Image: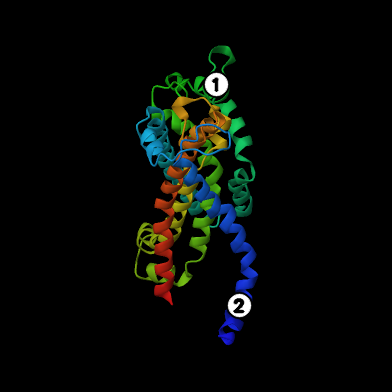
Amino acid sequence: MYGRFRTWGPGLLVLLPTIGLLGYFVYGLIGATLNTSLTAQHAARRGSYPYVGFENYANLFAEERFLNSLKNLGVLTVAFIVGTLIFGLLWALLLEKGVPGESIFRSVYLFPMAISMIASGVVWGWLMNPSTGDDARGINRLFHLLHLGFLENSWWSGTSRWTNMLAIALPAIWQLSGYIMALFLAGFRGIPPELREAARVDGASEFKLYRHVLFPQLSPIALSALIILGHMSLKLFDLIYAIAGPSQFRTEVPSVYMWNTLLRSDMAKAAAIAIVLLAVVAVLVIPYVAYTVRQESAER
């Protein structure tokens, strides 16, 4: 027994502070949030509140505003993931060819990541200002100069959920495409040159080389990027808040709705929204973690 402890005991002692902190500040607070969501605590005052079970969740899914926020989140997630993957892969393809000044292009593509979401949201909110006429600014002004008047004011017109959420997704795509580009570029550079040479010797065209040899090698990276982007889109708050503000019903997502609910001191309802978001994130992340563990086990 003592011999076993000498083997794994020192490592456990080193990890104990981290385990304790994670246990309290992550899982302990998740447990407290879950507990609050099952009570009738609709005020910020401390005290004893009766348990109402899943009544708060039932009320949420019967509420039009919450269902609207979920639909907005779905549109935002699809637009954000598709747009970021397309631009990230496109930029990686361009740089993978070894263009002159590659380091400059890499820096330009990655620069938006250095900007905070709040600052980016403020600037993009100004660019998408819906003012018209001689004082039209930002994107509307650009549409006006390009004689694309049918696009003016469509960003915040409220007539289309897709249009409104695409206006939110656009700055997020601009900011995260460089990160996805770096992932794909690292994947391209990690492919052995022998695979390319063997395919060319066998007479494969450039299209078939990428389609049948290179892209399949990038599938693990594409899956990782998909999970990362999906996880980030579900938690977008600061960018949306900076662009649309707290009271934009047509661009509200669950995270913003949770914040607005918390400001009204409805603790139980805000906690229920937080647990719903956690469950959605878990649906994305847990299968990915299980898949990764199986892959690593198979490679050993």
Name the side, left or right, on which 59 lies relative to 229.
left
Specify whether 167 is left or right of 216. Answer: right
Quadrant where the C terminus is found in the figure: bottom left
Could you tell me the amino acid type at mark 2? Gly
Where is residue 196 drawn, in percent x and y? 43, 67
Give the camera-side residue of 165 and 277. Answer: 277
* Quadrant (top left/top right/bottom left/bottom right) for the N terminus: bottom right
| Residue type indicated by callout 1 | Arg
Please say whether residue 214 is visible from this viewpoint: no
Which residue sits at x=40%, y=63%?
A: 290
Residue 294 position, x and y percent, is 39, 68
Q: Which residue is under mark 1?
A: 141
Q: Is residue 167 left or right of residue 298?
A: right
Tell me the SS state at disc 1: helix
How many labels were placed on the picture?
2
- Tell me how far mark 1 sits from mark 2, CA to CA: 66 Å
**What residue is at 54 percent from the left and 45 percent from the top?**
176
Lower position in the chain sequence, tag 1 or tag 2: 2
Residue placed at 46% from the left, 41% from the top?
37
- SS at badge 2: helix
For the residue pair 50 and 209, the one nearer the viewer reads as: 50
Q: Where is residue 87 in the image (x, y as percent from the top left)?
A: 48, 45
Q: Nearer the viewer, residue 269 or 137?
A: 269
Rate crowding at label 2 as few (under 14), some (14 to 19) or many (20 or more) other CA atoms within 10 Å: few
Identify the mark at residue 57; answer none if there is no mark: none
Q: Mark 2 points at which residue?
A: 9
Q: In this view, does 66 lie to the left or right of 248?
A: left
In the rendered image of this protein, does residue 294 appear above or below residue 79? below
| In this rendering, the label closer to the viewer, 1 or 2 | 2
Residue 265 is drawn in which quadrant?
A: top right
* Residue 222 quadrant: bottom left
